[in-house]
Amino acid sequence: MTDNQVVVVPEDLCQELVSRTDAFAAVEQVFAAMGRGDARNFPVVREAIGHAEALFGFKSGFDKAGMALGLKAGGFWPGNADRGLTNHQSTVFLFDPDTGRLKALVAGNYLTAVRTAAASSVSIRHLARDDAKVLGMVGAGHQAQFQLRAAVEQRSFEKVVAWNPHPDMLPKLEAVATELGLPFEAVSQQELGAQADVIITITSAFEPLLMLDWIKPGTHIACMGTDTKGKQEVDPELVAGARVFTDEVAQSVQLGETQHAVAQGLLDEGAISPIGKVINGDHPGRQGDDEITLFDGTGVGLQDLAVAATAAALAAKQGRAQTVSL
Ligand code: NAD
């Protein structure tokens, strides 16, 4: 039996290797593969483990086009902050699709943030109006900073307006906007809706934070925080009033932002389109300047595999891969 060389890519190396541009390309490609039916996510496992109030689970899948097979294992440990650790912890395992042998172990914390930001960024590129000028941020936690950096690369934004349920968290987001050379204004939710051309929601909310009446015609909204049953960031009437896109329809109606509108009979599952079809040119996307478009970014395992495969490939190419025999 031949030795199996497994590539190991730690957190700090992932941060050095995988740029926002790399993550964008990886996520856009895998959404396109999903849209063609060339890549499939497997059912998500997510369980309370009954210890440390932790949630643990797996997101897995196979991208036949990119030949990425594997899973992300990890979850949420609320007590980690007190230990100086990130609450969300994850690791990606990549396997050889031809033999099933483990190929790579890739740290997943930075990659989760950068792939989630890439997803909303892909939605902005394909769905927002070209003349979008004001970016609205709802949320100011760990992910929000990544979201902001990725979003501003898609349109010529001139200003950032933001609202967060915990206003004391906004200065950190303001610092990022300032670094990016953009004026920043903390506003009410209604004012955010009145000003923003593109809105990103990235909170842990369980109730609507934005109502349909507050949103301007032509706005693009990327709902990124709702990734679990029961979570919610926007009014179901707003979801129903928009042209809706998602990463994966089955996951969107089950645990994404559309779960509430669909459960209330306001939105038909058939009216939700995979963003991959827009990327592939099989769906026109936005169909008018006054349309509200909404992207429900639920976060799929294939995104994780795509960026982890990029990290492993770059590590190998640059001769920076650590390997272990297994
Ligand atoms: P964080 O803990 O750093 O920040 C949480 C954010 O939510 C803050 O803005 C906070 O003010 C707000 N918040 C906290 N409790 C709230 C409540 N009860 N009601 C309304 N807002 C509340 O978390 P993060 O790492 O920035 O993640 C934000 C959200 O994004 C989480 O829900 C997380 O599960 C989700 N997420 C989604 C994906 C995806 O692919 N879609 C990926 C990673 C994280």
Image: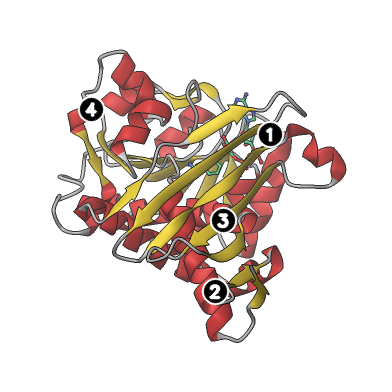
- What kind of element bears circle 4? helix
Amino acid beneath label 2: Met
Q: Which residue is labeled 1 in the image?
A: 167
Q: Which mark is residue 1?
A: 2
Earlier residue among tags 2 and 1: 2
**The N terminus: image quadrant:** bottom right
Give how far apart the Cα atoms at labels 2 and 3 are: 25 Å
Instruction: Pinpoint residue 7: horizontal percent, then vertical percent.
Output: 60, 72
Mark 3 or 1: the one toward you: 3
Q: How far apart are the alpha carbons under marks 3 and 1?
A: 34 Å
4 and 299: which is toward the camera: 4
Q: Residue at x 14, y 51 (%)?
A: 284
Q: How is the image coloured?
A: secondary structure
Give the amino acid at mark 4: Glu
Task: Answer few, some or many: residues within 10 Å of disc 2's Cα (few below 14, many 20 plus, some between 14 and 19).
Answer: few
- Say whether disc 2 or disc 3 marks the residue closer to the N-terminus: 2
